[in-house]
Image (cartoon, rainbow, N blue to C red):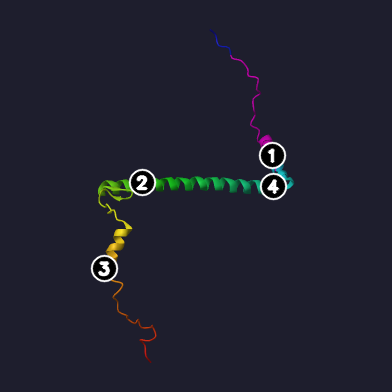
Amino acid sequence: MASVEGHTAEPRKTNNPATNAAKVQSSSSSFRRWGRKYPFVRYGLPMISLTVFGAVGLGHLLQGSKDIAKVKDDQEWEIIETKKALSRTGPIDAYKPKKISLEEELKALQQKVDINNYDYKRIPKPNEGNSG
């Protein structure tokens, strides 16, 4: 097999500094015309895009910090739970409340306090103690 070198269909680009400068000049002048002709493109579009992308970026950063704080809190809770054998409601098997009824509490209170025998005790007024 013999390799055949062929010419490509694209013409070769020449590096002429004068033509490159003219192209840059014309493109920059057309961009300036856009700014004068359509002020929204020059001022409004960058401001709106900055506002939208800034809000999206801040939301993303805040969500990341919330996730990190949640993971850190869970890790700390696991450490405490393993050290002290705690559950989310308190120590395991440490507190078992008595089953009490209101009637029993009332009877116990009536035995302590006798409402038929009492003494009147006068409570002094706040400005009575300061005689002047």
Name the one closer to the observer, 49 or 82: 82
Q: In terms of secondary structure, where does tag 2 sit?
A: helix
The image shows residue 7, relative to residue 124, as above or below, that is above
Between the C-alphas of marks 2 and 3, the distance is 49 Å
- Amino acid type, mark 1: Ser
Between the C-alphas of marks 3 and 4, the distance is 85 Å
**2 vs 4, front mark:** 2
Quarter of the image with the C terminus in it: bottom left
- 72 within the magenta span: no
Numbered tag placed on residue 74 in the rendering: 2
Residue at the spot of label 1: 27
**2 vs 3, front mark:** 3
- Amino acid type, mark 2: Asp
Q: In terms of secondary structure, where does tag 1 sit?
A: helix
* Residue 17 in which image quadrant: top right
Q: Which numbered disc flags the more N-terminal residue, 3 or 1? A: 1
Indicate left or right for 85 with 64 as reference. Answer: left
Q: Farthest bottom residue?
A: 132
Q: In terms of secondary structure, where does tag 4 sit?
A: helix
Tell me if mark 1 has few (under 14), some (14-19) or many (20+) residues whose alpha carbon lies within 10 angstroms of its own: few
Between the C-alphas of marks 1 and 2, the distance is 58 Å
Q: Position of residue 27 (x, y in %)?
A: 69, 39
Q: Position of residue 34 (x, y in %)?
A: 71, 44
Magenta segment, which residues? Answer: 5-28
- 10 within the magenta span: yes
Residue at the spot of label 3: 112
